[in-house]
Amino acid sequence: MGVFVVLPLVLPLTAWPIARLAGPRLHPRTATRVLALVGGVLAVCSTLCLLLLMVAGTAQLPGNPLPDAWADPEVRAVVPYDEAVGQAALVVLAAVVASCGQLLWRHWRVRAGATRALNGLTRDRRAVVPDERPYAYALPGGPRGRVVVSSAMLELLDARERKALIAHEEAHLTGRHHRYLLVAGLAARANPFLRPLRFAVAFTAERWADEDAARAVGDRRVVARAIGKAALASTPDRRLPLPAFAAAGPAPGPVPRRVAALLRPVPPGRAWPPAGTAAGLALWTATAGAAASALSSANATLVLVTVLRGATEAL
């Protein structure tokens, strides 16, 4: 295995440049998909790295569930290992599993709670909740999902701005942005180096919905005005792991940057920026890092499995 087993722990650093440049330099649809994919690959490889370090480093500990043949001195001489590193990897891996499980549970609980709260309301795709707090969010579930808007939010906006709000939330449902947000959130919990990607995906997913809403309404300034009004009246609720309209704070993204982007021309829709640009170089770097992480993980896994399988068959 050698150095290949630890590379996936640090290769997420290669995604930092594109996390910084994706928002202003890439089309938000492309940025969201690329960042979620790169983050997911890097997170899986990082977690696999911890698993390999744990298996190699704890095979000789009493009471471990691994086959006895894996602790044979001849096998240990072939497989590089460190018991202290293995025990540390065990603790970190347990923390990763617990953290990711907590996020999944929270995501399911919020969705289930919101669904129960809407049971007494209309079954239409758009549900208006009588509430003095202004908010709007996309609630996944069922064949199409639902758009949830408070009465206070609707009172803030005029007719065209309401249309922009509804188009924005429906874009979240159509694009299944909650899945990208969940992948990015799990990746950040699997490896802290991937936290910048989580914030970047939250921002680009909102920008993606902004652009779809602007196309549906036919006026970018109307969407920008609706976002600004909603943001001034809203208070951030970080407990809601769903795409929310114009919420303040770092998630789903700085509102002034979204408004400024809507006041500029439509971003180019090219799938991949030129290699000579800053965004192109950053994207190639992140792609190379993800590929190197995948190859390193595959190499280390293959070596360890081959050695341990051979030891089990020989003894």
Image (cartoon, grey):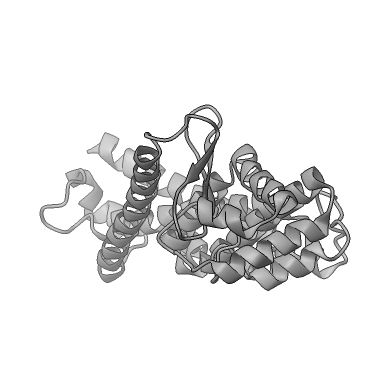
x and y percentages locating residue 250 in the rendered image: 55, 70
Residue found at the far left of this picture:
63
From the top left corner, tell me how far across and down residue 302 is, in percent.
46, 45
Q: Nearer the viewer, residue 250 or 296?
A: 250
Which image quadrant for residue 284?
bottom right
Badge count: 0
Q: Quadrant of the N terminus?
A: bottom left
Q: Judge left or right: residue 194 versus residue 282.
A: left
Residue drawn at point x = 57 percent, y = 62 percent: 252
Specify whether residue 298 is in view.
Answer: yes
Q: Quadrant of residue 253?
A: bottom right
Residue 296 seen anywhere in this rendered image of the structure: no
Position of the C terminus by quadrant: top left
Decide which of 62, 38 is in the foreground and name it.
Answer: 38
Vertically, is 7 above or below 177?
below
Towards the viewer: 62 or 218: 218
Is 160 left or right of 38, judged from the image as shown?
A: right
Q: Is residue 295 above or below residue 4?
A: above
Give residue 190's position: percent from left, percent from top.
42, 59
Front position in the image: 276 or 292: 276
Asked where in the image residue 85 lies, by quadrant, the reply is bottom left
* Residue 135 x/y as whole percent: 52, 57
Q: Residue at x 69, y 60 (%)?
A: 226
